[in-house]
Image: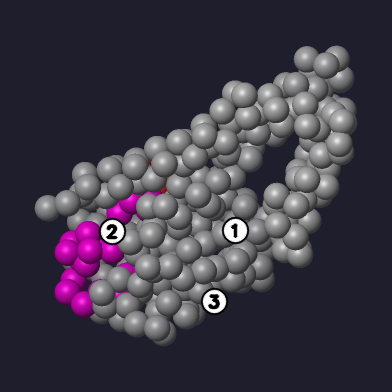
């Protein structure tokens, strides 16, 4: 894949640019568009990449990554449609937006791949799920998969599963950060200095994530191994069950899925 342009270099757009550079891609092969000049200058200084207009991005890039908020998509597609080259591949990171929206607004036959990544892209540990649009072939999915493999793991899913993926892994890091935040608060309640509580919890999260990633044991068995008979952990688990934490997580993820579907419906014709 030659030149890549990120349209909308906010949090996830910057995570992708930064991850690609850390993964060895030359800043000269990366372009971005941003609507605030001061934000563009900041990114140029930080990464040595070039801020351009949508027209220039369309002329120079082989792959265009759309990373604006779903609510901001209409003007971006209106700017892109008249200048997009036929051979360009469009990749959408936008939650909820179906590939059919891009196919309807961009020149007929434009290959579109929908991707749901997540912010651990910044540290090369993204989880991305890709789905091909109507005009995207296996070669397009392969190109996007190769690109995203530089910044983490990639799976291909049917597009009908993308709202669920968005709720699970797209938003997923936020749930873990929220849990860590709450556990640090508990440490403070128990009288630990904040720095100590942070260190204890972050390292516990890193260790638990590594054990899960090794994949040799199911999460239930890993949790049971911590839960000694008549010990401390079971008292905590009883409180989690009493407060409905499992049901709350399931309901939270279902609500995120519903919001993703709603964002898509807002762009139906
Ligand atoms: N954050 C995340 O963890 C994830 C986000 N996503 C998806 O990525 C997309 C971006 O999300 P996120 O990065 O969080 O949002 P941000 O608001 O941080 O980033 C969007 C960026 O696009 C800019 N922008 C808006 N319109 C234009 C335009 N016409 N031309 C150029 N730039 C423009 C915004 O500028 P301004 O500041 O002026 O609004 C902003 O910098 C969303 O669709 C989201 O669903 C997907 C997976 C994970
Ligand atoms: O909150 C959001 O809408 C985006 C999509 C997934 C993660 N962040």
Q: Are there few (<14), some (14-19), or many (20+) residues within 10 Å of tag 3? A: some
Q: Are there few (<14), some (14-19), or many (20+) residues within 10 Å of tag 1? A: many
Residue 146's mark? 3
| Mark 1–mark 3 distance (CA, rounded to whole Å) | 13 Å
Q: Nearer the viewer, residue 53 or 241?
A: 241
Q: Over which residues does the magenta segment extend?
A: 94-113
Residue 252 in the image: state x and y as whole percent: 47, 36
Please tell me in which quadrant of the rendered image residue 246 appears: top right
Q: Quick check: can you spot residue 224?
A: yes
Give me the residue at 39% from left, 58% from top: 162
For label 3, being within 8 Å of ligand 1 is answered: no
Residue 126's mark? 1
Magenta run includes residue 61: no
Q: Nearer the viewer, residue 202 or 157?
A: 157
For label 1, being within 8 Å of ligand 1 is answered: no
Q: Nearer the viewer, residue 172 or 57?
A: 172
């Amino acid at each position: 894949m030659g030149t890549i342009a990120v349209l909308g270099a906010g949090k996830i757009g910057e995570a992708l640019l930064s991850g690609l550079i850390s993964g060895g891609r030359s800043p000269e092969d990366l372009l971005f568009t941003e609507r605030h000049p001061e934000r563009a200058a900041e990114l140029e200084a930080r990464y040595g990449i070039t801020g351009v207009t949508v027209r220039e991005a369309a002329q120079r890039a082989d792959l265009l990554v759309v990373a604006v908020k779903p609510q901001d998509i209409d003007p971006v597609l209106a700017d892109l449609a008249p200048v997009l080259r036929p051979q360009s591949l469009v990749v959408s990171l936008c939650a909820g937006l179906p590939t059919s929206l891009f196919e309807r607004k961009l020149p007929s036959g434009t290959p579109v791949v929908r991707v749901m990544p997540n912010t651990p892209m910044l540290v090369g540990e993204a989880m991305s799920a890709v789905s091909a649009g109507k005009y995207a072939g296996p070669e397009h999915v392969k190109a996007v998969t190769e690109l995203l493999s530089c910044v983490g793991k990639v799976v291909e899913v049917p597009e009908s599963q993308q709202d669920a993926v968005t709720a699970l892994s797209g938003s997923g890091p936020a749930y873990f950060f929220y849990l860590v935040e709450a556990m640090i608060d508990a440490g403070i309640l128990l009288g630990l200095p904040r720095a100590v509580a942070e260190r204890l919890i972050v390292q516990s999260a890193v260790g638990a994530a590594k054990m899960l990633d090794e994949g040799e044991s199911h999460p239930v068995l890993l949790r049971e191994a911590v839960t000694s008979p008549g010990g401390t952990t079971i008292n905590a688990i009883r409180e989690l069950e009493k407060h409905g934490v499992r049901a709350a997580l399931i309901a939270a993820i279902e609500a995120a899925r519903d919001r993703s579907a709603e964002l898509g419906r807002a762009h139906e014709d």
